[in-house]
Image: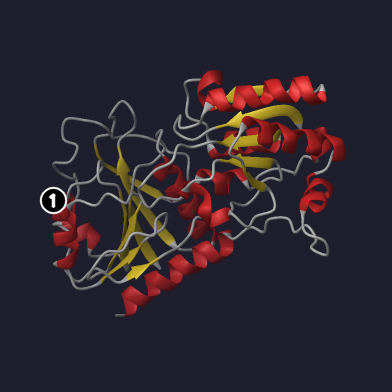
Amino acid sequence: MRIGIFSTFDVKCGIASYTKQLADELDALGHDLTIFCNYNLNNHKDVDFGVEYETYPCYEWYGETNKKSWDINSELLESFDVLHIQYESWLWAEDYFRNIPAEVPIVVTFHSSCISPAFIQYINSIENQVVCLTHHNVGCPGFNVRRIPMPILRQTEVEIPFAAKKNRLFSFGLGRNNDKFCLEALSILKDKFGVEVEYVTEYSTRNKWYSDEELGHMINDSKFVALMYPATGAEVSSSAVCRALTYKSLVFVSNTKWFEHVAGNDNVKGVDTPEKMAEHMGLAFAYNSIADYSNSVLPEGQEYTPPVSTMTEFVDKHLEIYQEVADD
């Protein structure tokens, strides 16, 4: 299948990471891909993104022409079986897509619960469309809505046993983490259990956005991961926690809407107080194994089940929808 994806790419953006993960999997299955994306960070048109499939830089990243026009012609777009728009309200304006030929099927993934009225009007003006609501539970009246939850990603390196992981509490995800909460928990852990754990955040270690491989290694090599996000009234869910579950570290989350979709996972612990986080870490050290620790706090007769990657189901669902709109 010939698939065109409109997205950010190779920049400090979660949507760019999402697109690369999806595109890598589709490419491995033999599909013909083109990513219609930004120029590089210096707005150069000649840029090697280091992937086997085709990239077509056609707009400026935070540039003067952003939200104004595409450097792309409609004749090229006619050659695709399906075009997939990775939508974020601050990134795209509806005018970007008015040059898409009417006969080319469109799939839209909303990466935000904030959707501009003008974009909704545009989507309602075209016939062949399916909207995949990937991260959120927001309803879109009049749309053919499908929800594709974020997957637990494939491992890119050998799993490090819990006992061999560094005594590290690692946090990441757009600077949302409650550092004060985490540091207080580590202080309690030291005083009560006599164990010292280093606290590392994505922003304290470097200014560069972690690549998927680097982020995966930091998670794999840390005993604990913290995603203590603030409460929100919006319908949201965290893709960061799905990334954190790639490897069997113990993942602490706040009891908010961000993490409701992984509430039943054995490696996820919702905590309301630093004392509770410290208690969980202390018990994990005592057992020196996530599986043994998890079994110790499960109801009698229930056994620990490690998380299972759902990347295959994630890609298969996209292909099912692509085929559906292409056949319509």
Q: Nearer the viewer, residue 75 or 67?
A: 67
* Quarter containing the N terminus: bottom left
The amino acid sitting under disc 1 is Asp
Q: Quadrant of residue 190?
A: top right
* Quarter containing the C terminus: bottom left
Q: How is the image coloured?
A: secondary structure
Q: Residue at x 61, y 40 (%)?
A: 271
Q: Residue at x 60, y 43 (%)?
A: 244
Q: Nearer the viewer, residue 307 or 303?
A: 303
Tell me where residue 26 appears, x and y as whole percent. Answer: 49, 60
Label 1 element class: helix
Tell me where residue 24 appears, x and y as whole percent. Answer: 50, 52
Q: Which residue is mark 1?
A: 95
The answer to whether residue 238 shows anywhere in this view is no
For this orientation, the residue located farthest to the bottom is 328
Q: Is residue 65 left or right of residue 37?
A: left
Q: Quadrant of residue 145?
A: bottom left
Q: Quadrant of residue 221?
A: top right
Q: Nearer the viewer, residue 158 or 27?
A: 158
Looking at the image, residue 81 lies above or below residue 227: below
Looking at the image, residue 12 lies above or below residue 188: below
The answer to whether residue 230 shows anywhere in this view is yes
Looking at the image, residue 33 lies above or below residue 176: below
Q: Residue at x 78, y 24 (%)?
A: 192
For label 1, count other residues whose C-alpha is less than 10 Å away and answer few (under 14), some (14-19) or many (20+).
some
Q: Residue at x 36, y 47 (%)?
A: 233
Tell me where residue 223 appears, x and y as whole percent. Answer: 73, 35
